[in-house]
Amino acid sequence: MPTLNINGKDTLVEANVNTPILWALRDTLGMTGTKFGCGVALCGACTVHVDGVATRSCVTPISAAVGKKITTIEALVNDKVGLAVQNAWIAHDVAQCGYCQSGQVMSATALLKDNQKPSDADIDTAMAGNICRCGTYARVRSAIHAAAATLV
């Protein structure tokens, strides 16, 4: 049984090492903030950070994260950048149905940790692959710019 560092805590995961991180989080550990969307890394709903990199957890096996730090949406309230993104999301009314939002927020947070002054093109590139069925892409971009402005 592998041990994973999830949100800063080493956690023994009772699952096969080939199990996708998503299912270890949701089914084994009961952490349901990370969502299942497509199962083939096309929609972004399952995005987590692995060593700070936005990663699709539905196709990434546990074995790829052993010895690395996994951060989920549950931990972003304790992260300056993650909290700025979440506050901007609320201020800009980004969420409609909300299903994709944990993945969107995780991708936006990874972007702003790497680039605190992203252009529209930077945002579009970083957020590509995060599908919002409600079409809130303009509000996503506005919220990322707003979050970036609070971090300067």
Image (tube, rainbow, N blue to C red):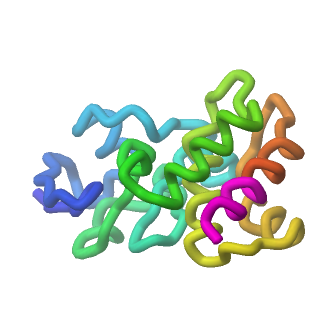
Q: Quadrant of the C terminus?
A: bottom right
Verify whether residue 15 appears in magenta: no
Q: Is residue 148 magenta?
A: yes
Q: How many marks?
A: 0
Instruction: Residue lying at the far top in this picture: please name it.
Output: 97
On the image, the x and y values in percent for residue 106 come to 55, 53
Magenta stretch, main secondary structure class:
helix
Q: Residue at x 20, y 48 (%)?
A: 15
In the image, taking residue 93 as reference, residue 103 lies left or right, namely left
Placement of 112 over or under 1, stated as above or below? below
Query: Which segment did they paint magenta?
Result: 144-152
| Residue in view at x 67 percent, y 40 percent | 89
- Above or below, 44 against 64 in this view is above
Q: Is residue 124 visible?
A: yes
Left or right of residue 67: residue 145: right
Percent coordinates x, y for residue 32 in the rendering: 39, 32
Displayed quadrant of residue 5: bottom left
Task: Please say whether residue 20 is visible from this viewpoint.
Answer: no
Front-most of residues 70 and 78: 78
Query: Residue 67's x, y, as percent?
Result: 23, 75
Q: Looking at the image, which is closer to me, 53 or 109?
A: 109
Q: Is residue 78 above or below residue 70?
A: above
- Residue at image x 31%, y 58%? 18
